[in-house]
Each structure stands twice: as C-alpha cells, then as structure tokens.
Amino acid sequence: MSDMIEKHGADASVAEVQAAASTVEVPSYQPRQTFRQMLRNDLGFLPVLLTLVLIIIFFQVLNPIFLQGENFTNILLQSASLGIYSSGIVLVLLLGEIDLSVAAVGTLCGVIMAVLTERHGWAIAPALVVALLAGGCAGLLNGLFVAVLRIPSFIVTLAFFIIYSGLLLFLLGTQTTQSVGDPFILALAGTRVSYFTDVLGVGLPTLAVLGYVGSLIIEYFARKKAGLRTMSITRLMVQSVVAVVVIEGVVVILENYQGVPYSMGILFGLILLLWVVLTRTSFGRHIYAVGGNAEAARRAGINVVGIRVAVFVLCSLIAVLAAVVDTSRQNAVASAIPSMLQLNIIGAAVIGGVSLFGGRGSIWAVVLGIFIIQCLDNGLSLLNQTSDVQQMVEGLVLILAVTSDALIRRAQARSRSGR
C-alpha cells in the first residue's frame, strides 16, 4: 500500500488508490477447519440422523416386530399427516415466526369438508374447494395481523386457535365426531388404503432421490465454476449416500409388505415440491432472507409484508391437505383437537434441525423429525409404556434439540465476531 501512495502521490484521489488496490493480488488463505467447525457447518444434520438410527436399533433389539413391514407401514401412515402439517410450519419457522393455530385450522377445515359431504350431500371436489378456501382465509388473517398490523405471531395465532376450537364445537353441534365414508378420502390413508403398483412404488422414489442427488452435484460444480462458496465434498457425499440409503431402505421394507401407500407419495411429493421452491426460486430465497434479517431484506427491495402474508396462507393451505390425510386415517373428524398435535407439528420441525430463530433449516428436516417422534411413540407403545412416559421422552428430545440449536447459534455468532 505504501508503494501505491508513493506512486500516486499524496494528492492522489481515493478512486485512484482504490483502483490500484484492486490490482493487488491477495493470497488466498483457507484456515483448516476443526472437527467442531466441520460438524457445525457441514454435517449439522448428522446428530439428528444418528439419534434416529439409535432409536431404531434400540427398539428393534427390544422388540423385533418394530421393523417388520406391517408395523413400519403403520408408522409411516401415522407419520403422513404430521409430516404434511410440519412441512407447512417449516415455512413459518424460517421467517422467525410461529403459528400455533395450524392444528386448529386443519381440524376445522376437515370438519367443514366432512359436514358438507356427509350432512349436506356435497360431492367431494366442491367440499375440498370450500375447505381450501377456508384454510386460505385463516392463513390470510394470520398474515395480515402479523405482517401488516405487526402483532406478535404467538399472540395472533394463539387467539385464532381458541376461536377455531370454539367454531369446531359449533359446527358439529352435539356430536363429538363425524364419520366420513367417501371412498376417495378413505383410500389415502384409511382402512381402504391404496398402494402404488410395484413399478411406481419403486420407480417414483428412485427417480426423486436421483433427481435430488443430481441437483446437489450440478449445484456444486456450478458454484465452484463461478467461484462461489460451496459445500465440502464430504458433505456432498454424505448427503447423497444418506438420501439414497434412507429412501431405498424404506421402499424395500414397504415393498416386502404391501407396497408404498398413497399418503407417503403425498408427503414426499409435497416435501420435494417445497424443497424446489425454497432452493430454486426467488420466493424461497426471500423467505430465508426475511427470516435471517428482515430489515436487511427490506432494504434489498424484498416485499417483507408480502412474503410473510404468503407464507402464512401457504402454511394454512398445507394444513388443509394434512387434515384430509388425517381424516382418511381416522375415518372421521372430531370436535376436539388432539392435545399433542400442535406441539408435535412444531416439535418435528425443530427436532429435525429447523431453527426457531428463523433463516436456517431445510424442509427435509421434517423427515427426520417426524420419524423420531413416531418411532418413539410406536416403539414405546410396543414396550407397553403409557402415554405419560411417551410425552416425557418426547419433551426431553425436544428440549435437547432446542438447546443444541441455541448453542450452535451462539458459537456461530462468537466465530463471526472473532474474525
């Protein structure tokens, strides 16, 4: 720098000095990562995956029925609606917001659909349209109160949870449940479960996982060619291998029983769609930007209010889809919202690695989160443990997940401030 000042003189303009400085070659230096840094930045999903593997091994050793085709299919059928619910809540969590009304919205829309079809003789198609419209309006109300009126999402969604709980009682009247007999609904996850053919049951998941791995590889080389920061080759290999092993392993177990149920196709199709939206579209990048730093996103020209409203609407619409699948599994709708449903919806996303503070997490976290919760419920039930033990264990896993997320964020903040 002193040579530049001598060359340009004391009266040199700032522009000249900056232009000269831009020609100076700065040697690149990439500090060697410690194991802790590598685990935190590149392999942060491994602790969650390892937890799931240990849970599966533990229950399989204690009860060999656990991984048999019939029981595993039952786990997946129970996971479908919860996974769909959690897929929607992930979008809200990425914004750094919370939606405590999503279980009530889904249950309410399921009741609307059932009342229209069973009591008023509507066909299933228009009944589903009305249910979706009701869900969209509920999400719009949440979004307007949170994004426009700037009322904390915790308060807004809790209030609507209470309102919708009362509306459920009003719609069903003296009945506590309403049975559903539509064959289309029952075929999704109910007693008349329909399964994909062997060709589709094996082919569709295989194509999906190959597409996912291929997109990771293409993105890796594209970013590397452009000189942008890329994931490590270790993370690329681990993510690819884990995706292939998990998906194909699940398919093998299911095909050895009756096949892949439609509800699993709905769940993984939705997750794949949301993954594409979040990682390949400007809308998805804006969600991460708003969740990471809303003020910076606003100054960058992002419509923060619009993004927040859209996400709450989308979350509620996804809740309607989850309610349809849950109605199929239960063969009925009820006026009471399951006591643990809302907590499990949020817990599945958080346990899977989505941050409660916004801006960090993947939609695929839902898969790990719901499997951990459902494997715990199913495994403890096979061991004849009561619901009180199940809830205590789930609560312990959730507090560990939230604590690890907070500690990781603090470590990352200290790392950035020390640079």
Image (cartoon, helix red, strand yellow):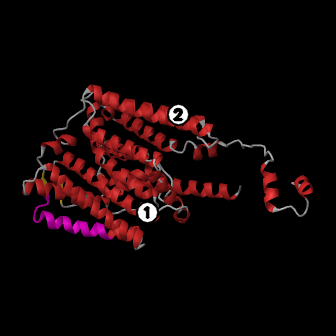
- In the displayed structure, 390 sits above or below 237; it is below
Residue sitting at 42 percent across and 44 percent down? Answer: 276
Query: Do the CB atoms of the residues marked 1 and 2 lie less than 8 Å apart?
Result: no
Q: Position of residue 313 (x, y in %)?
A: 33, 59
Q: Quadrant of residue 58?
A: top left
Query: Marks 1/2: CA distance?
Result: 32 Å
Instruction: Please give the count of numbered marks on the rendered protein.
Output: 2
Residue 417: % across, % down: 68, 59
- Kindly tell me whether residue 242 is visible in this rendering: no
Horizontal side, residue 288 vs residue 311: left or right: right
Question: Label 1 belongs to which residue?
Answer: 97
Determine whether, in the image, residue 72 is placed left or right of residue 112.
Answer: right
For the magenta stretch, what is the residue range?
159-177
Residue located 29% across and 58% down the image: 103
Task: Using the rendered view, name the quadrant where residue 79 is placed.
Answer: top left
Residue 217, numbered circle: 2
- In the depicted view, which residue is nearer to us: 259 or 321? 321
Type of amino acid at the residue the image marks with label 2 = Ile
| Image x and y of residue 157, in percent | 34, 67
